[in-house]
Amino acid sequence: MVEPGAPQRAEGLLEQIANTALDDDYYVVRAGELAPSRKFNTVLTALVMAVFALLVTIAALQTRNDRPATERERSTLISDVAARKELQADREASAAKLRAEVETLSASVDRFDPAYENLRLQAADEGASGPGIKVVVSPNQFGNDKGRITDSDLQLLINGLWYAGAEAVSLNDQRIGTLTAIHAANGVINVNYRDIAPPFRVIAIGSSESLQQRFEDNPAGRYWAARQKEAGVGFGVTASSDLSVDPAPKGRVNIRHATAIEGEE
Amino acid sequence: MIPVIGLVVGIFAGLILQPTVPSELQPYLPIAIVAALDAVIGALRALGERRFNDRVFVVSFISNVVIAAFMVYLGDQLGVGSQLSTGVVVVLGIRIFANAAAIRRRIFHA
């Protein structure tokens, strides 16, 4: 026999719950004032039953009333999901379309177009290299006004080189583009809005022999020959088979006012 | 007979008044009902075994409802509300089934 109060044999928790399903208080027999009134037919019991019924009814009604709202919410969510899926499919389709478009466009850009490259070269949008001449001009040694190199001197020089057939010209490593200006500001000459100082090195890409010859023959060449003679300014021409010029700064090759005609290739 | 009248009165009170439960109390209502059901089934079994006591019934009813609701509240505060509700429902369900089985055995002798 097991002593009363000693631990019973170990049981599973669930088994224990099942075995002690009825509250222990029902088994306790009390004496005196708290002696159990074993009557079922009391107002107290009725009260508890009423509360129980009320609870169940409230819960049932509440659930029933909430159902339409829940249903509505659910259907809204479902249609929302469907709409979003549609939107996503739409977006994916347009993304695929755009991707294909990008591919065709980049393929067409990648195609080497000699005419286009030539235009870029002329517009100073691309660096150039090849044979050409290098002209170095410097003021005379006396430092007098006559011997200074002015912006118009340089403009004449560069225009003369263009006239002589130069394909690309740079002045002190600044490429002369369509919008490049050479002018003096506060006694300092600037080109592409960069200040430059003597000696001025002008590189002209083109056939070096004919460039030199044609420059000497044209008015600019004659002007510079005169300047050399009268003011003693430094003027040296070197032909070279391997010269290169950088592209002009982006701001100097932008198209400001022209627009492409639609449909023109 | 009086308890049956109480039951009917409760049902009609709910149907006629249609009180709305405050939304912050709504999660505790189902658990409270399961706990109350446990107390009621236990009382029925005690009645069958001739050891019913209205005082014990009242106390077990109230304490069941309050403790079950409190456990769910605590679980909500700790972020494990659904797990604790499950635990409460499992324990109370086992008790309900065990008591119902005892009643069944007494009535049908099987």
Image (cartoon, coloured by chain):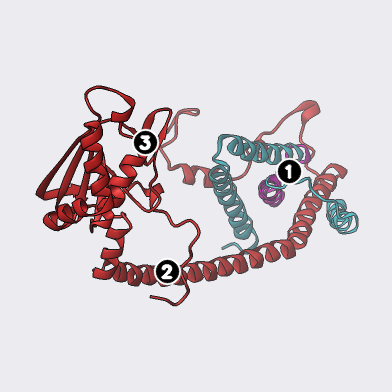
Chain colours: A red, B cyan
* Residue A113 visible in the displayed image: no
Chain of the residue under label 2: A
Q: Residue furthest bottom?
A: A263
- A183 relative to A34 in the view: left or right: left
Check contact, mark 1 vs mark 3: CB within 8 A.
Answer: no
Indicate the amino acid at tag 2.
Leu
CA gap between label 1 and label 2 equals: 54 Å
Circle 3 residue: A190
Circle 2 residue: A98
The kind of secondary structure element at disc 2 is helix
Q: Is residue B5 above or below residue A196?
A: below
Q: Residues within 10 Å of mark 3 (few under 14, many from 20)?
A: some
Q: Nearer the viewer, mark 1 or mark 2?
A: 2
Q: Residue at x 84, y 57 (%)?
A: B11
Q: Is residue A176 magenta?
A: no
Q: Residue at x 29, y 59 (%)?
A: A122
Q: Nearer the viewer, mark 3 or mark 2?
A: 3
| Residue B33, percent from left and from top | 70, 49
Q: Is residue B52 magenta?
A: yes
The kind of secondary structure element at disc 1 is loop
Q: Residues within 10 Å of mark 1 (few under 14, many from 20)?
A: few
Q: Residue at x 28, y 22 (%)?
A: A143
Indicate the amino acid at tag 1.
Leu
* Residue B28 visible in the displayed image: yes
Circle 1 residue: B25
